[in-house]
Amino acid sequence: MEWSWQRIPAEYLVINVKLCRNGKLARRKGYLHVRKGRIEGLGVGQPAINGVPVLDGEGLVCAPGLVDLRASFREPGNEQMETVATGSRAAAAGGFTSVVTMSGTDPVIDNSGMVRYLIDRGREAGLCRVYPTGAVSPGRQGEAMCEYGDMVDAGAVAFTDDDVPVASGGLMSNALKLTKVLGVPVISHAEDRSIVGGGVMHAGYWSGRLGMAGMGRAGEDSAVFRDVELARATGGHLHLAHVSTKGAVEIIRRAKAEGINVTAEAAPHHFSLDHSRCRDFSPLFKVTPPLREPDDVNAIAEALADGTIDAIASDHAPHTGTEKEYQFDQAPFGATGLETSLAVGITYLVNNDILDLGQLIACLSEKPARIFNLPGGRLEEGAEADFVLFDPTEKWTVDAKGFQSRSTNSAYLGETLTGKVKATFLRGRLTWRGEN
Amino acid sequence: MILQSKDVLGLEDLTAEEILGVLDVAAHFRAVFDRPVRSVPIMRGRTVVNFFHEPSTRTRISFELAEQRLSADIINFAAATSSFSKGETLRDTAENLAAMKIDMLIVRHSSPGAAQYLAKVLKCSVINAGDGAHEHPTQGLLDIMTMRQRLGDMRGKKVTIIGDITHSRVARSNLWGLVKLGAEVTLCGPPTMIPGGLDKLGAKIEYNLEKAVADADVLNVLRIQLERHSSKSFPGNREYHRMYGITEDVVRKLKPEAFVMHPGPMNRDVEIASEVADGPRQVILDQVANGVAVRMALIYLLSGGDPRSLGSSAN
């Protein structure tokens, strides 16, 4: 991409790009016309507009800015792992313009003051829209309820105890009822801890062979089933985070067919990697829910293709030192994801003919924005100009040195992926510029 | 060269040929025990560190004895007395050890993969003395040595391992080694103590003790620690003894030449009845003696010892 601007003008054209919108990639090249932070116009061919600065995006795809439904920015409390500023930079580098952040900070985001604090920090960073979630229960203790209404007024977009499952079905039921009135979802990390116990990886061949405590599928499936039934009973909006089993996919498919208000997301590692990755004891592959079996991996990919799973969420979970400091069983769960989600999607879903590029982008932008009722995710006249330019065929090797995130615990280190973000724009302003 | 790698991390990594080669050398050392001078000075001036991040008496003493008989300089450090109690990571420990230029590291650790990790980052030889529930290769080798002393060629021999297989590194190392030597391995225990996947490594799974031992040439009885790991995986010691304990009754029904092994320490009248533990069918103290010989053999071979210079084996 030729790049001659010192700074981004208030009005400009991006030309020779293939527009990706409404689940479809345009066959012919087109243009995007940006003016004062909004999309002034767009279309195929060359624009009949003179005297406006031009950015030539030859060979690139122009898609809506990506929308992430699940990232941990670790601030406040664990700024050595990530901050709102470094997390926002990672988001921009990954093509994201909107990020829903998890409530599990220290202290927990369980009141309106904390929600406002995060939104302010996000604005200061100015690299993506930060949408905080609030906790279901104060301190994520699973006992009382937080003030959902006050937090929604402050800007909370959903409620979740993050990676702590809501063990009490009664609490979950009440949260679904109360948030229904507020028009926001409850996000469930569906896991029955009494079943998965002290497990550190998927219960199966590899955990048996390696001598690791296993987390069986039933621990996820039964929790998904409970929450789906609570959503049926309450009419509340249940959003299932990082679905990883074929059984959970089946339960969600049935629930949607029956008209239950349930949505779901999948993390990139769950449609690309299986439990055999743990064979060398590398804690980079320790995530929750765990990497499962090949038929689960295939079921997640197919569920994205048929719409049973609505969205791809990065499940960005930065940790310091996981590569070197910890043994697998002692290491924390989680892997970073913001800077690899798009490329993992292209590499494993598009290149394997499971989704086409238009569908992939919809799973990363339009659909997550729609199910969480967020602005963004659309390239259309009048919309705010959140967009990403990427090369869908360029190969690159994931290297810890290349990350903008403060942490480097990626499950794809050393792997060659396809699809490279070249530039990300938020309200028409450049937030990330990749190498040419 | 009998051993291809600089380390011994698990029987998964050894070939049948390597296992038999080690056992030949071990048999030589076992014969040396009966001589008035039992030491072989191959390790003179070399330092072996015994790093036990998990409590162990038997294995640590067995390694120390093996090291002494090979004239090594020995450093012991255990979790309670090391900086581990202050939260030092394995990586920092490894870097410290590397800076001190030790010649060999014996490691026992509660995390599966800990020995693999140290072997990767250290230039010296590493012997795994047990990593979590993953592998315990020296125990596997001494068990196989004890079996071969009585059964000879292990091809087609039936070995039944009984106990908490899920938490047992002994079971996994036995399984890898025995399958490589052509034995038929049955794993037996309550369904809550047998993980998925081990059938794919060549084991037969049998939850009924009577069926599991009917045909067996050897029973390898594992230590049960209901109080430690498995508080929710079995009702209690009494029920365990009733259903899976190796009692006189069980032994009476075995094939006449079949025998009973136990890696120790025993819980008498839980996994094994006292009469059996003290009876004529057990070979437990042989296992202990073979343990020293196997550990001597590994240290000797990893230190560049030439088995041809040992003269003819006494076996």
Image: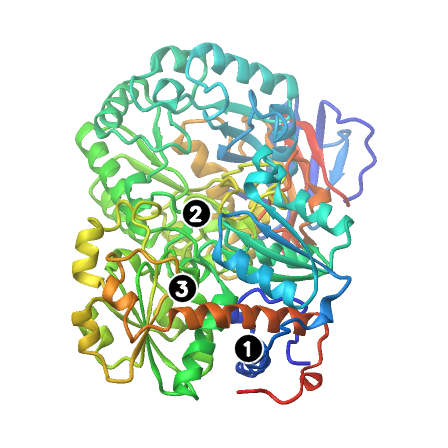
**Do the residues bearing badges 2 and 1 touch, measured as CB atoms within 8 Å?**
no
Q: Earlier in the sequence, mark 1 or mark 3?
A: 1
Q: Residues within 10 Å of mark 1 (few under 14, many from 20)?
A: few
Q: CA distance from mark 3 to mark 2?
A: 27 Å
Residue A277 in view of the camera: no
Residue situated in front as seen by the camera: B189 or A175:
B189
- Residue B34's disc is 1
Q: Position of residue A267 (x, y in %)?
A: 47, 45
Label 3: element kind: loop
> On the image, numbered disc 3 is attached to which residue?
B263
Residue at x-position 56% and y-position 28%: A73
**Do the residues bearing badges 1 and 3 touch, measured as CB atoms within 8 Å?**
no
Marks 1 and 3 belong to one chain:
yes
Q: Is residue A406 above or below residue A198?
A: above
| Chain hosting mark 2 | A
Q: Which amino acid type is marked by label 2?
A: Val
> On the image, numbered disc 2 is attached to which residue?
A200
| Chain hosting mark 1 | B
Q: Position of residue A117 (x, y in %)?
A: 54, 13
Marks 3 and 2 belong to one chain:
no
**Screen quadrant of the N terminus of chain B:** bottom right
